[in-house]
Image (cartoon, rainbow, N blue to C red):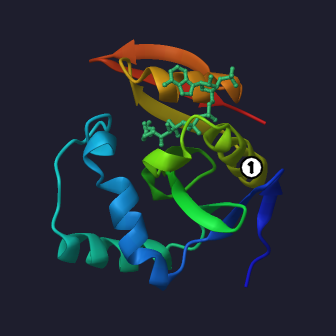
Amino acid sequence: MSPAIAQPQIQLRRARPDDCVRVWEWNFAPDVRAVSRDARTVTFTEHARWYERRLARTAEPMWVVLDARVPVGIVRLDRIGGAGDVARISIALAARARGKGVGRRALAAACLAWNRPIVAEILATNTASRACFEACEFEAAYERGGVVTYHWSP
Ligand SMILES: CC(C)(COP(=O)(O)OP(=O)(O)OC[C@H]1O[C@@H](n2cnc3c(N)ncnc32)[C@H](O)[C@@H]1OP(=O)(O)O)[C@@H](O)C(=O)NCCC(=O)NCCS
């Protein structure tokens, strides 16, 4: 098993097959869908198929966020174009875990672990997410169609 990546009290561990249901719950919570670029919902069966394929892409990390060892969310890095060094990041925390600094520390840990350029595409209206990424030194590069693209580099 790969070692966990730590920030104080927060750990990222590689997502596992048995996280499938909780990842579904985090990613498809109505309030998360409402702030996602792709607001469409999918069936659990579709999610499970995607999840199995996504887990197999081991060069593109997908981590479960642990707060005091309790799973509270997911952070994912998808390589842009499927190859290369630049990754697109996405994060979703359970509602009960938000607003306590977990997101900021999870993002910082993910950036440290990837240690290569990262982009984030965030709805302009998603104030909490934008504040979180800005707190992690992501810089707004441009806004198009209501989506702000942020860049981070080591
Ligand atoms: C976005 C998200 C990951 C942020 O994580 P979080 O743990 O709630 O954020 P934190 O508590 O670490 O806060 C980080 C910064 O954002 C600010 N922030 C957090 N929630 C905020 C809110 N609702 N409004 C304004 N600022 C907010 C904090 O003040 C903090 O800034 P600071 O470090 O300068 O004080 C989390 O809220 C979430 O999962 N939301 C739903 C899914 C989502 O929006 N994902 C991102 C899609 S791109």
| Residue 122 left/right relative to 132 | left
In the picture as drawn, the residue positioned furthest to the front comes out as: 96
Q: Residue at x 66, y 31 (%)?
A: 152
**Relative image position of residue 21 (x, y in whole percent):** 36, 74
Question: Does any atom of ligand 1 lie closer than 8 Å to the CB of label 1?
Answer: no
Position of residue 58 relative to residue 129, above or below, is below
Q: If the image is split into quadrants, where does the N terminus sit?
A: bottom right
User: Quadrant location of residue 13?
Assistant: bottom right
| Residue 96 left/right relative to 50 | right
Position of residue 124 relative to residue 9, above or below, is above
**Relative image position of residue 63 (x, y in whole percent):** 59, 63
Q: Residue at x 59, y 52 (%)?
A: 84
- Asked whether residue 47 is in view, the answer is yes
**Relative image position of residue 120 (x, y in whole percent):** 51, 34
**Relative image position of residue 30 (x, y in whole percent):** 25, 46
Of 107 and 145, which appears nearest the observer? 107
Q: If the image is split into quadrants, where does the C terminus sit?
A: top right
Q: Amino acid at mark 1?
A: Ala
Q: Residue at x 35, y 18 (%)?
A: 125
Callout 1: helix, strand or loop? helix
Ligand 1 quarter of the rendering? top right
Position of residue 6 relative to residue 93, above or below, is below
- Asked whether residue 61 is in view, the answer is no
| Residue 120 left/right relative to 59 | left
Using a 10 Å C-alpha cutoff, classify the residue at mark 1 as few (fewer than 14 neighbours), some (14 to 19) or many (20 or more): many
Q: Which residue is mark 1?
A: 109
Q: Residue at x 55, y 72 (%)?
A: 15
Number of numbered discs: 1
